[in-house]
Image (cartoon, helix red, strand yellow):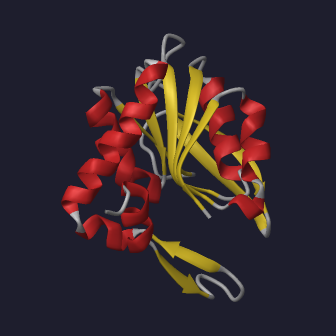
């Protein structure tokens, strides 16, 4: 009998040279065609995160939203979005950060978190760690406490864990490559 991790990994498809030449993209969308498997996955991931007693789950645009919302529901905590610049209404806080080939900026609504919040930050993949590290800094700027990172998968060879680890929060990855 296959483990949950084996069943999930089986559905994540490698797409070579997407979105640019030389990149092997991990397509997670086939996973969401199996609702029972997703329910199992969410329950297992949430059970690992319960020990941190989070009061909010923050997810990254856009693939982080796919498991972020069901994780928040399973944990019984509010769901908060971090989005690319200019995508959120109202007053926002933002942070700029460097990518391999340019700069990016992400934002969070100013009233989304408080200094009383214990936050889990979820995204689909931990690659170089730059986006997750920037998101962690954005969360901390609200006064909230970042207690854990949650990723569906981690690409070990890119060493993102080294960057994300600078935030003194637990790091949970469901599958590693």
Q: Is residue 62 visible?
A: no
> What residue do we see at 48% from left, 17% from top?
117
Q: Is residue 126 visible?
A: yes
Looking at the picture, how far across and down is residue 144, in whole percent?
A: 56, 19
Q: How many marks?
A: 0
Looking at the image, the residue that sits furthest to the left is 36
> What residue do we see at 72% from left, 41% from top?
164
Is residue 154 or residue 143 the one in the foreground? 154
Residue 89 in the figure: left or right of residue 137:
left
> What residue do we see at 37% from left, 70% from top?
29
Looking at the picture, how far across and down is residue 84, in whole percent?
A: 55, 53
**Does residue 7 lie above or below 152 as drawn?**
below
**Does residue 131 lie above or below 158 as drawn?**
above
Looking at the image, the residue that sits furthest to the front is 1
Looking at the picture, how far across and down is residue 54, in whole percent?
A: 44, 22
**Does residue 139 lie above or below 83 as drawn?**
above
């Amino acid at each position: 009998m296959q483990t949950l991790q084996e069943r999930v990994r089986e559905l994540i498809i490698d797409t070579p040279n997407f979105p640019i030449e030389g990149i092997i993209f991990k397509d997670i969308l086939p996973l969401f065609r199996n609702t029972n498997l997703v329910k199992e996955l969410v329950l297992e991931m949430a059970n690992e995160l319960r020990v941190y007693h989070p009061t909010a789950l923050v997810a990254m645009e856009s693939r982080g939203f796919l498991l972020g919302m069901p994780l928040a529901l399973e944990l019984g905590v509010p769901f908060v979005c971090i989005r690319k610049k200019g995508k959120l209404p109202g007053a926002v806080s933002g942070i700029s950060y460097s990518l391999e080939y340019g700069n990016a900026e992400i934002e969070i609504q100013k009233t989304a978190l408080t200094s009383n919040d214990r936050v889990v930050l979820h995204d689909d993949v931990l690659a170089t760690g730059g986006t997750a590290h920037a998101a962690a800094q954005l969360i901390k700027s609200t006064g909230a406490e970042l207690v854990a990172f949650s990723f569906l998968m981690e690409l070990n060879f890119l060493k993102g864990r080294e960057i994300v680890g600078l935030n003194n929060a637990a790091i949970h990855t469901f599958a590693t490559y």
